[in-house]
Amino acid sequence: MEPIINSQAPEFKVQAFQNGSFKTVSSDDIKGKWAIFFFYPADFTFVCPTELVDMADKYAQFQAMGVEVYSVSTDSHFVHKAWHDASETIRKIKYPMLADPTGALSRAFGVMIEEDGMAYRGTFLVNPEGKIKLAEINDNGIGRNADELLRKVEAAQFIAEHPSEVCPAKWKKGGETLKPSIDLVGKI
């Protein structure tokens, strides 16, 4: 299996539901921008709405950092709209909900569960150059935390701006970083 970190994000063109409208979203839309792809198994399920509303609660913060969030499931854009219309929780979502009914995008990111026709809970951060900088895949019973993802995006953006530094465990924005050198070997 080839590592996904620092690989180029796949080319794609899919339908999406956002803010009461259908639209087309493609790989051209992420060029020159930070983007999160937030895969989940299916609409009208149990853990998924808790994660999606957690991301919705942080969406303004991600946008302020120049990051667009794209949730992705193998449901159609019509199903996304129906879920939005049926669920008070899902109505809070303002980011694009990408439709991947063929599973092409889920396969490209390596999260497709072929026998179920659904995706694992995959989280991917793509930088403005189109390279995947963060990849995390959870089994479907394990929900994610938007606060932790926000912290990781802050770290990725920091090291993109400061390539000679690295962020240690539990680093938070404004915290101390490390400058790798021979002087640090065995001293941390």
Image (cartoon, grey):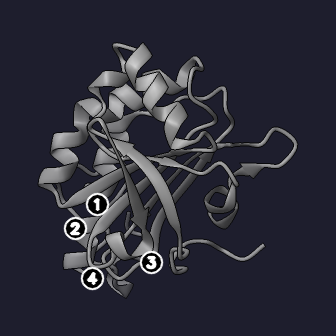
Residue 131 numbered tag: 3
Name the kind of residue labelled 2 in the image.
Answer: Phe
Residue 163 numbered tag: 4
Spatial separation of the CA atoms under disc 3 and disc 1: 15 Å
180 lies above or below 111: below
Name the kind of residue labelled 3 in the image.
Answer: Lys
- Badge count: 4
| Left or right position of 46 against 186 | right
Name the kind of residue labelled 1 in the image.
Answer: Ala
Q: Earlier in the sequence, mark 2 or mark 3?
A: 3
Spatial separation of the CA atoms under disc 4 and disc 3: 15 Å
Element class at badge 4: loop
Name the image quarter holding the N terminus.
Answer: bottom right
Q: Mark 1 touching mark 2, by CB under 8 A?
A: yes
Q: Residues within 10 Å of mark 2 (few under 14, many from 20)?
A: some
Q: Mark 4 touching mark 1, by CB under 8 A?
A: no
Q: Earlier in the sequence, mark 4 or mark 3?
A: 3
Element class at badge 1: helix
29 lies above or below 144: below
Residue 155 numbered tag: 1
Which numbered mark, 2 or 3, is in the foreground of this view? 3
Residue at the (33%, 82%) spot, across then down: 183
Q: Which residue is mark 2?
A: 158
| Left or right position of 101 against 162 | right
Q: Position of residue 187 (x, y in %)?
A: 38, 68
Between 180 and 64, the residue placed more toward the observer is 64
Q: Residues within 10 Å of mark 1 (few under 14, many from 20)?
A: many
17 lies above or below 27: above
Name the image quarter holding the C terminus.
Answer: bottom left
